[in-house]
Each structure stands twice: as structure tokens, then as C-alpha cells.
């Protein structure tokens, strides 16, 4: 709570969206939240990002959070599998002055990512099903320009990555190990919320 109190507050619409998520979703903690959202905004402002790809939209909190600090000619291309979440997110995007910056790609994320142009994005945010995390990372690497950023959420998975047993923890550990050995990027694993992996692309 102290960290949240000393970080920029969410917009009123994001507060409404977060409240709706906690009241209507079975696993509301999937939402990125204020601190991770502020981190994403900070990186966007730091690197002057305009084109962002997001893998895993959920109810749209992080997509809207990022769109709020993008310039008018910026855009967020976000991938989401579940129709329920697409409808919820779009209803909130329609209320926002920044909603027009967001394009939702419904369906399997990997298929959507394959349709996007290599090197055309400044930043990628991955927060979807954990089994496919490594594939998402590999594809996003090709989509990001040199000097661009890839951010992956839930990279600590409640600490289960230390002794991974279930499929999700094993997949996240495998992704983390791959990134650690990927000399094409500069990476840092931050103990922010459930673990945020921050990667800067050094090579094509």
C-alpha cells in the first residue's frame, strides 16, 4: 500500500475497470494493477514508444493504461482469446479518450502475432497463458525494433519457479532460463509484484 500511495494514481476509468474486474471475474488478480501499469507507462515515456504489442489483454487494464500515455499517433495492438474479455475491454475502451489507440486482435495470440510485421514495434508486453510464454517471447523478439523493449509479467509465479513442479511454473522457468542465455538482449528480472522480466533488444 505504501508503494501505491507513493506512485501516480490510476485514472478514474482505470479505477472503475479494476473495480469491475474484481467484482465480476473469477481470477481478478490476473489484472496488471497500478504498480506494473505505472512501470509500463514509465518505459513508454522513457523510450518514446509509439507502437506497442500486448499478448494477453484480460479485461483491458494494461492496454488502456499504456494507451493513456501514448501520443495521438501511437497504438496498442493487443491479443486476447476469450470473447468475454474482449467485450468487457471494448466497453471500457469506448468510454476513454484513448480507446481509439487500441486495436484488439481476437483469437489465438500466436496466429495474430504471425500476421504482424517484423521490427515494427517499439515495445511488447507479455501477460498471457504461461505454457506459450517462450513462443510469445521468441515471436515478440522479431516484432520489436533494435533498442526496443520486451516485458514479461508473472516471471516469479509466486516463487514456484525456484522449484517448478506444475506446467505453468516449468514453462515460466524455461522462459526465464532462455532469456538469461539470450545474448541478443540485456535483461533484468525485477521483484515487482509477481516478477517482471525487462529486456532490451540489442541485436536484430
Image (cartoon, grey):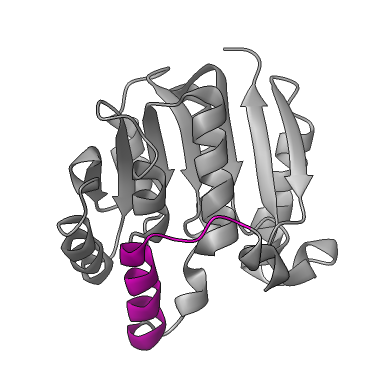
Going 32% across and 29% down the picture, which residue do you hit?
71
Going 46% across and 80% down the picture, which residue do you hit?
27
Left/right placement of residue 162 relative to residue 201 reads right
Residue 77 shows in this picture? yes
Going 38% across and 79% down the picture, which residue do you hit?
19
Residue 121 in the image: above or below residue 67: above
Q: Nearer the viewer, residue 25 or 181?
A: 25
Going 25% across and 62% down the picture, which residue do you hit?
89
Q: Residue 110 location, x and y as percent?
A: 38, 43
Total count of labels: 0
Residue 52 in the image: above or below residue 38: above
> Which quadrant would the C terminus be assigned to in this image?
top right
Q: Residue 176 location, x and y as percent?
A: 72, 46
Q: Nearer the viewer, residue 51 or 202?
A: 51
Residue 59 shows in this picture? no
> Which quadrant would the N terminus be assigned to in this image?
bottom right
Left/right placement of residue 124 relative to residue 90 reads right
Q: Residue 23 location, x and y as percent?
A: 36, 87
Read off the magenta span: 7-24
Check the image and name the residue furthest to the right.
162
Residue 48 falls inside the magenta stretch: no
Amino acid at each position: 500500500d505504501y508503494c501505491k500511495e507513493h506512485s501516480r494514481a490510476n485514472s478514474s476509468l482505470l479505477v472503475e475497470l479494476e473495480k469491475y474486474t474484481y467484482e465480476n471475474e473469477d481470477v481478478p488478480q490476473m489484472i496488471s494493477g497500478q504498480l506494473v501499469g505505472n512501470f509500463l507507462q514509465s518505459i513508454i515515456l522513457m523510450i518514446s514508444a509509439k507502437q506497442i504489442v500486448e499478448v494477453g489483454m484480460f479485461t483491458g487494464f494494461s492496454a488502456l493504461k499504456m494507451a493513456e500515455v501514448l501520443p495521438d499517433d501511437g497504438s496498442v495492438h493487443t491479443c486476447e482469446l476469450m470473447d468475454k474479455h474482449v467485450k468487457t475491454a471494448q466497453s471500457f475502451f469506448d468510454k476513454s479518450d484513448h480507446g481509439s489507440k487500441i486495436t484488439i486482435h481476437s483469437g489465438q495470440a500466436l496466429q495474430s502475432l504471425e500476421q504482424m510485421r517484423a521490427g515494427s514495434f517499439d515495445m511488447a508486453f507479455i501477460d498471457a497463458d504461461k505454457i506459450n510464454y517462450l513462443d510469445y517471447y521468441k515471436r515478440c523478439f522479431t516484432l520489436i525494433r533494435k533498442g526496443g523493449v520486451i516485458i514479461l509479467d508473472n516471471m516469479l509465479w509466486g516463487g514456484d519457479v525456484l522449484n517448478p513442479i506444475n506446467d505453468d511454473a516449468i514453462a515460466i522457468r524455461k522462459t526465464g532460463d532462455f532469456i538469461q542465455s539470450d545474448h541478443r538482449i540485456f535483461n533484468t528480472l525485477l521483484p515487482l509484484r509477481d516478477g517482471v522480466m525487462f529486456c532490451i533488444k540489442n541485436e536484430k
